[in-house]
Amino acid sequence: MSTLPVILLLSGSLRVGSTNEAVLRTARAVAPSVPVEAVLYDGLANLPHFNPDDDLDPLPEAVAGLRAAIEGAAGVLVCAPEYAGTLPGAFKNLLDWTVGGTEICDKPVAWVNAAAPGRGQGAEATLQTVLGYTGADIVEPACVRIPVRRETVGTDGVVDDPEARRQLAEVLRLLAAPGGRPPDPRSSNAGGADFSPTGA
Ligand SMILES: Cc1cc2nc3c(=O)[nH]c(=O)nc-3n(C[C@H](O)[C@H](O)[C@H](O)COP(=O)(O)O)c2cc1C
């Protein structure tokens, strides 16, 4: 049995041929070099619509599976597209299901914005808000922009770009060892409202 830290990979896209999922498959491909074990969550389409009335024991099976996957992970990496200026509804639904559990509290979490330069800030802002609300430990240095064009995704479904692969390995390293990250620049800024994790 592997003793490596597990990083759970959450894609925000249900699309076949998703670039966001390709980024996460690439993270999974480089994971052994970190080394971590990267696990791609594949239950997004099976989650029921969030309803607080259903957020009690016994939880819907798909929700229990999601929460168990988060609980068992040392960290979580999100890669989600922007739809209409924010997150896709299906992925916001997933995040809503994490609010009622404690699994994501203090869990190191980061996201990669794979959109073209200058795009996707609405999705990033929503992730900052919602994950902040859940109490996740947002690992700011690991929240990066790695623009990925569909043409750079090979027939094997991974991104064939050495720089992207290097950045993803670094993201995984930071998620697995958040104690080793640089000091949080917000620590002297109690409000923190103007903070942008990707430096925009
Ligand atoms: C319904 C819809 C809404 C979108 N809205 C935005 C948007 O607001 N901003 C943006 O930059 N891209 C927007 N896009 C483009 C997607 O973010 C882009 O195609 C992305 O690559 C999709 O991710 P995927 O390849 O992982 O499925 C939208 C796409 C769709 C289908």
Image: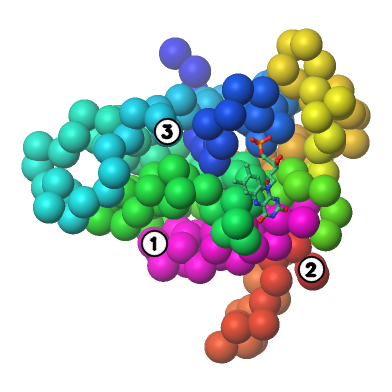
Query: Residue 152 appears in which quarter of the rendering?
Result: top right
Answer with mark 1 or mark 3, whichever residue precedes in sequence: 3
Classify mark 2: residues with Cα within 10 Å, few (<14), some (14-19) or many (20+): few
Kindly identify which numbered label has been placed on residue 44: 3
| Residue ID for mark 1 | 134
Residue 111 seen in render: no
Quadrant including the N terminus: top left
The amino acid type, in three-letter code, at marker 3 is Leu
- Magenta region: 119-145
Q: Residue at x 60, y 22 (%)?
A: 16
The amino acid type, in three-letter code, at marker 1 is Thr
85 relative to 167 in the view: left or right? left
Q: How many marks?
A: 3
Kindly identify which numbered label has been placed on residue 53: none
The amino acid type, in three-letter code, at marker 2 is Gly
Quadrant including the C terminus: bottom right
Give the spatial CA distance, label 2 vs label 3.
Answer: 29 Å
Kindly identify which numbered label has been placed on residue 199: 2
On the rendering, which quadrant does ligand 1 occupy?
top right
Decide: marks 1, 3 in contact (CB < 8 A)? no
Give the spatial CA distance, label 1 vs label 2.
Answer: 23 Å
Give the overall secondary structure of the magenta segment. Answer: helix
Give the spatial CA distance, label 1 vs label 3.
Answer: 18 Å
